[in-house]
Structure formats: structure tokens, C-alpha cells
Amino acid sequence: MALIAVIISVCIAFLDTGWATKPTTYHSICKLKKRSADCNGRRLSSVPKDLPAGIEELFLDANVLQTLSNASFIQYHVLQNLSLHANGLELIEPGAFLGIRNLSLLTVSDNFLSLNYSVTASALWTLTYLRKLDLSGNQLTELMMGKLVQHLSSLESLSLARNAILRLDDSHFRNLPNLQRLDLQQNYIFEIEAGAFENMPALQQLNLAYNNIPCIVQFDLIQLQMLNVSNNHIEWFLSAENNASFELETLDLSYNQLLFFPLLPKLNKLQTLLLTHNHMNFYGKFFNNSNSSVQLLFLDGNIINITTQELWEENNHGNFSSLTFLDMSWNEFSYFPDYFFKGLISLLYLNLSHNCLKILNIEDREMLNTLIDLDLSHNLLSKLQMNLGSEGSLTNLRKFNLSTNNLHGLPHQFFIHVRKITTIDISKNPIHICYPYSATSPDCVTFTYANSLRNLLLSGCNLSMLSCHFFKGTSLTYLDLSNNPRLLISGLGTLKDITSSIQVLYLRNTGLSAAGTKMDFSAFQKLVNLDLSGNSLAYFPESLIYLKLYTLDLRMNFYHSLPQYFMEKQLGKSLRVIYLSENPYDCCKMGWWDTLQSHGTLRIGDMTDITCNYSSRFISATNIPESVHHDCRWLTTNMALLYLVLILPTCLTLLFTFIIVFLIYKEKILQMLKSRHKKPSPY
Ligand SMILES: *[C@@H]1O[C@H](CO)[C@@H](O)[C@H](O)[C@H]1NC(C)=O
Ligand SMILES: *[C@@H]1O[C@H](CO)[C@@H](O)[C@H](O)[C@H]1NC(C)=O
Ligand SMILES: *[C@@H]1O[C@H](CO)[C@@H](O)[C@H](O)[C@H]1NC(C)=O
Ligand SMILES: *[C@@H]1O[C@H](CO)[C@@H](O)[C@H](O)[C@H]1NC(C)=O
Ligand SMILES: *[C@@H]1O[C@H](CO)[C@@H](O)[C@H](O)[C@H]1NC(C)=O
Ligand SMILES: *[C@@H]1O[C@H](CO)[C@@H](O)[C@H](O)[C@H]1NC(C)=O
Ligand SMILES: *[C@@H]1O[C@H](CO)[C@@H](O)[C@H](O)[C@H]1NC(C)=O
Ligand SMILES: *[C@@H]1O[C@H](CO)[C@@H](O)[C@H](O)[C@H]1NC(C)=O
Ligand SMILES: *[C@@H]1O[C@H](CO)[C@@H](O)[C@H](O)[C@H]1NC(C)=O
Ligand SMILES: *[C@@H]1O[C@H](CO)[C@@H](O)[C@H](O)[C@H]1NC(C)=O
Ligand SMILES: *[C@@H]1O[C@H](CO)[C@@H](O)[C@H](O)[C@H]1NC(C)=O
Ligand SMILES: *[C@@H]1O[C@H](CO)[C@@H](O)[C@H](O)[C@H]1NC(C)=O
């Protein structure tokens, strides 16, 4: 039966000449789609012989093809792309690619081609049209690599990532005149000799990330457009001092040990420069009179070349006129020399976060005027010196991050001159609020002219009780006031002027408490995301049920239970995510919880963290034991009985006392009654 099925499907594969036009056809083993055959993960130990002869693309990834024998592809004349990733492939016989001279793309990553590399090399040499070759993850040394690629003069793209390459010199890459992209990341390269890449005149992209390169000196790859040397141990980056025009557009030096700003080619086309996670600073300010030249010794074979480099001569770092993206975060910059920002005439993104800046001086005319995103977070800034005249600096800024500094305020009239700003993060600064009489003081914050502002972050600023017109003039849509524990003690009055625009509001740990204040959210009609966590709230704010919230955070409050009816109101219809943990819910009043869980469209974001309190024990709300349910039921339904049981003896005692008293004093009482009756009648 199985045999018949195989025969039928093979017949279909041969007879169905129109297979190319159908989206998917099934071969007995492989999936056929257009002119491509997908035989991935089928435990094949040899290349299937019965695929349509017209396939142009063949995937054989994750099979067990240990050896690729002679003439394996002989019937697939028009094959262009072949992938043999992760097969445990050890050997490609010299004639394996017979008949597919036109192969242009070959992927043999994650195999064991180091084992028989010289035989495999002669197989590769037959691929005279090969344009793209992936040899990553094959435990190749530089010697093996050199042999494997040495006659592949048609190659345009070569990956040798994740191999065992230690060093490179001019003997390793020979005769690769068309190579444009070379990936050598994740090797162990510690040395690259001069001329190692000189046989690749067309090289545009070179990736050397994750190696052990200690320095790059005399960088002279003029034609290179992209150089990635991130995640090495580079202490020096020095370009060759010549007047050539470098094509370099992207340079990634992040995650290295640079102490000095790299010495870039004088003439370059650099657009993206990534320098994050190094140890750079400028030093000229500290050493203005001392001799700042160092002598570098270059050892090249037996020749020692001594170059004198002026380190503190800072206006020598190359031409940045085309730079648009500069990331210098996570370094040790404590200041920037005057010329530095002046040269950045096209810059759009600048990241200086996680440095040691105390003062930032951008006072020159029109300085950094193209910049749209400036990140100064995590510094020691206590002062921003800006030029805010008619030809001021930063006039195009949209996003400004000042989080985690030591600022009391923004420069006077900041928002009048930086008129396009939409996002500002001043969180975690000891800011002072401007009061009308102090509005000219530079050390305070006011949003009076911040009409363009939409997103404002003021969390952790130790703010307390702002005036009710603090946000007047803004149209904020996103506001984070979290972690200002005394800010909203007297209610939501401060937010009065933004109720109609605000969409996302973070009020975590802001001193809101329903007991002291009446919280009315009914005017916040555009609100979609509200965070009320960490506020000692015991009552659910009634006004929320008419809002169209999408996300609601009620964590870390004093809720014993939540109302059930809100799920039927507007809130229940719109709400998609709710956070509820860290509240002392009463395990016996969890009716609301069942309703919430059975609500189809609502996701409880912290489901597993929610606990309830049962006789001073915290029990996971998702997993309340039946015994607790039972006890709760007993408690509620039998409460009346309990009262009866408690009250009955008292009542009975009273009744008995009364009867006994009555019996003892029966005579006297009767007499008393009689004597009352013997009242003298008026007749
Ligand atoms: C071969 O692979 C390249 C890159 O993945 C792709 O652009 C091309 O279309 C493929 N050729 C065929 C015939 O499928
Ligand atoms: C190989 O490619 C060349 C041009 O690139 C073409 O003329 C020739 O017909 C192709 N050979 C096969 C067998 O497809
Ligand atoms: C494979 O072909 C090559 C020549 O292309 C030949 O030297 C070699 O002996 C063949 N190997 C086998 C196992 O047939
Ligand atoms: C391939 O390499 C293995 C182990 O290095 C060796 O035993 C075997 O003889 C080699 N095969 C050929 C064809 O060279
Ligand atoms: C450099 O290579 C690393 C590692 O592959 C990668 O994460 C990074 O994005 C690359 N840099 C650029 C600019 O492409
Ligand atoms: C570069 O050009 C300048 C003037 O054009 C010249 O003074 C200098 O010597 C040149 N430098 C080199 C290394 O060629
Ligand atoms: C450097 O020079 C400036 C003035 O030009 C001076 O204020 C400063 O103290 C000098 N620093 C050192 C380390 O000499
Ligand atoms: C600094 O020292 C070097 C060598 O000691 C000397 O060649 C150079 O002229 C000195 N430079 C200055 C500015 O004193
Ligand atoms: C030594 O330096 C000179 C001039 O700076 C340069 O022309 C020469 O190529 C260098 N030699 C080596 C081996 O780097
Ligand atoms: C920087 O390069 C640009 C063109 O790439 C050129 O117009 C400009 O004059 C150069 N600036 C300096 C200071 O060399
Ligand atoms: C620095 O800021 C830019 C945006 O200006 C961002 O893309 C980049 O990821 C940031 N770098 C780090 C290390 O956070
Ligand atoms: C500002 O930077 C801090 C830390 O560098 C980051 O956590 C925060 O998300 C940034 N703010 C904005 C609005 O991007």
C-alpha cells in the first residue's frame, strides 16, 4: 500500500508538467513550490534523485548527509541555490557539483567541513559562478579557509562566521576580486596584518565583531562602506593619515576598550558611528600645558615603525559633516571640546547617556540644529547651557531625554525656542517648580509654553502638590508622574487642564488614597491606559466604569475585593489587560475574580501572582483549595445559624429567669395587680 502511494506520488511529480504554476505540490518527501524544493529535516542521507529536473532552488537543511558524493545533482542542471545547513557534512567529493556549474548560492553552515577540507576545496573550485557562500560554523582555521575559497573568484559574499580563525595576512584571501561582503564575526582573530584585505578591491562590508582584536592602526580600506568591529578589545582606532577620500559610511566600534575618540579618516562619508560601551573621554582640558604626544611602535615583521600621535590635539578627529547617527552612550565623557559639536552639521540622533557629564555647553549659534533626538540620561548634569536666541541651538529637537541627572530645571524659555519638541523625559531629577515670581530663574521647570509637548515623564522627581494650572497650555497625551509619593495627596486637581487630551497616565505611588480624596476620572474621556498601582486605595473609583480603558493597573493597593458590576459597564467592554496582584483580597469574597476570569476578552497580566488572604494566610487566587471554599461557604451560609446558636442560650436564660422570678413573686404580683384594680371608682 505504502509502495503504491510512493509510486503514485512520483508519477504525479513527473506527469504534472504544470507544477510550476501551482502554489504547492507534494513530492513523496519534499515540498515543491514554484521552482523550489524544500526537503528540510527529512533524515535524508543522500540527495533525492526524483525531484523535478527544473528546480532552481533546493533546501536540504537538517538532514544527515555526511558525504556529498560525485554527481549528486547531475540531473538538476538549472539549480541556482543550494542549502545544506546542519547536516553533519564532512566531505564534498570533487565531482559532487558536476552538472550544476551555474550554482550561484551555496549554504553549508554548521557542518564539519574542516575534516576533509582539501578534498572539499577541490569540489568548491568547480563552482565557477558561485556568488554567495556560507561556510559559517565549520571549525575552519585560517589555513583551511584560505584553501577553500582560493579559486572562487566569482564570489560576492562570503561568511566565515563562527569558525576558528586566529589571524589574517595577505596569504589568506587571494584572488577574490569581486567580493563585496565578508563576515568574519565570532572567530578568535587577534591579529590582522597590513595587506590582509588588499586582494579584495571590491570589499564594501566587513564584519569582524566578536573577535579578540586589540587595536586597529593605519586603517586604510578606502573602498569599505561598512566596518563592524564591535565586541573586540580595541584600545586604539587610528586611520592612516592620508588625503584619500574614504567610502566609509557605517563604523561600529561599540563594546571595546577605547580610551580615546577614534581617529577617523579626514575625508569620509560617515553616517553612522557607534561607540557605545567604551571608556572614552576627551583629555585636552586636563593637560593643556603638558606634552600630549605618544609614540606608537608598529611591529611589522622585523620592521619597527614609530609614529608620533598628538592625543590631546582634539580638532584632529576627522570630518563629521555627513554624520547622522552618533551613539556615545556608556563611556566616560566628562566634557566635549568646543569644536566637537560644531562639526556635527547633519546629525539627527545623538546618544550621550551613561557618561559623566556635569555641564553641557551647546551655546554656540545654531549648534546641533539638525538634531531631532538627544539622549543625556544617566549623567551628572546640573546645568544645561544653551543658546536660546533667534539663531539658537537645538531648534529641531523632538525628543529630549534628561532622565537620571541632577537638574533643578530647564534653561529659561526652553519651550519658547525649542518649538518642535514632543517628548521630554525629566524623570529622576531633583527639579524645582517655577512659581510666577520665580519664572525667570534658570533653575526651575514650567510647561507654560510647551504647546508642542505630547509626552512628559516626571517620575521620581520628589514633586509635591503642584498648582492646579501646572499643565495649562499643554496638550499632553502621555504623562508619567509615578513615584512622587506626596504629589496627589489632595486629589487629581493638578491634572485639570489635561483631562481632555491625556491617553496614557501613570500615577503609581503618587499618594492617592480614596479615603482622603474623591477621585473623579469621569472627565478623562480619552484615557486608554491608567496605572493606579502603589497607592493604598481601598475602594474602586466609581468614575472609572464609564471610561474606555484598555489597560488598568491596580497592583499594590488595599483592595479586599473588587466590584463585579463594572464588567457589564463601558469599562468591561473596552478593557483588555488588567494587573491586580499585591492586594489583600479576601478569599471568601472572590466572586468578582470568577467573573473576571470568565470574561472572554480580558487578559489578567499578572494572573499567577495574585493572592488572597484567608485567616492571615496568603493563598494563590488561581488555586484556592476546595477546603477554603468549603470553609468560606460554611462561614457565610451558617453565619445566621451561628448567630442563632450564640443568641439562643442568652434568650433562654433570660426567659427562665423571668419565669422563676414570676413564680417566686407570683402572690405579690397578683396582689399588686388586684390592688391596682381596687382603685376607687368615681361613683
Ligand atoms: C536564491 O536565493 C536568493 C537569495 O536568498 C534569492 O534572492 C533568489 O531568488 C533565489 N533564487 C531562486 C531561483 O530561488
Ligand atoms: C548558466 O548561466 C549562463 C549565464 O549566466 C547561461 O547562459 C547558461 O545557459 C546557464 N546554464 C544552465 C545549464 O542553465
Ligand atoms: C569523484 O570524482 C572525482 C573526479 O571528479 C574522482 O577523482 C573521484 O575518484 C570520484 N570519487 C568517487 C568516490 O567516485
Ligand atoms: C576524511 O577525513 C577523515 C578524518 O579526518 C578521514 O578518515 C578520511 O579518510 C577522509 N576522507 C577522504 C576522502 O579524504
Ligand atoms: C555589528 O555586528 C553585531 C554582531 O553581529 C551586530 O549585533 C551589530 O548590529 C552590527 N552592527 C551594525 C552597525 O550592523
Ligand atoms: C594632504 O594634503 C595637504 C594639503 O592638501 C598636504 O599639506 C599634506 O601633506 C597631505 N598629506 C598627505 C599625507 O598626503
Ligand atoms: C588649563 O587652562 C585653563 C585656562 O586656559 C586653566 O583654567 C586650567 O586650570 C588649566 N588646566 C590645567 C590642568 O593646567
Ligand atoms: C613632546 O615630546 C616629544 C618627544 O619627547 C617631542 O618630539 C615633541 O616635540 C614634544 N612636543 C611638545 C609640544 O613639546
Ligand atoms: C612606516 O611609516 C612610514 C611613514 O609613516 C610609511 O610610509 C610606511 O609604510 C610605514 N611602514 C610600515 C611597515 O608600516
Ligand atoms: C568635510 O567634508 C565635506 C564633504 O565631504 C566638505 O564639504 C567639508 O569642507 C569638509 N570639512 C572640513 C572641515 O574638512
Ligand atoms: C542611544 O539612542 C539611540 C536613539 O537616539 C538609540 O537608537 C540607541 O539604541 C541608544 N543606545 C543605547 C546603547 O541605548
Ligand atoms: C530615557 O532614558 C532612560 C535610561 O537611559 C530610559 O529608561 C527611558 O526609557 C528613556 N526615556 C524615553 C522617553 O525614551
Image (cartoon, helix red, strand yellow):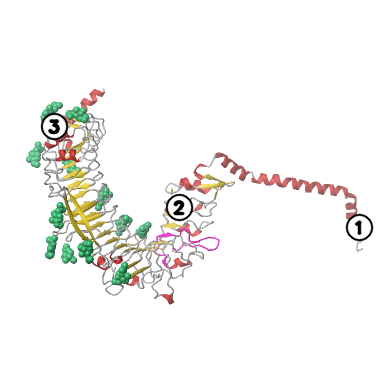
* Residue 572 image label: 2
The answer to whether 339 appears left or right of 646 in the picture is left
Q: CA distance from mark 2 to mark 3?
A: 70 Å
Mark with earlier residue (2, 1): 2
**Residue 491, relative to residue 62: is it above or below?**
below
User: What's the amino acid at mark 2?
Assistant: Gly
Which residue is the site of mark 1?
A: 678
Q: CA distance from mark 3 to mark 1?
A: 141 Å
Q: CA distance from mark 2 to mark 1?
A: 76 Å
Residue extent of the magenta highlight: 497-523
Which residue is the site of mark 3?
A: 94
The answer to whether 603 appears left or right of 215 in the picture is right
Instruction: State ligand 4's quadrant.
Output: top left
User: What's the amino acid at mark 1?
Assistant: Lys
**Residue 576, relative to residue 65: is it above or below?**
below
Q: Is residue 135 magenta?
A: no
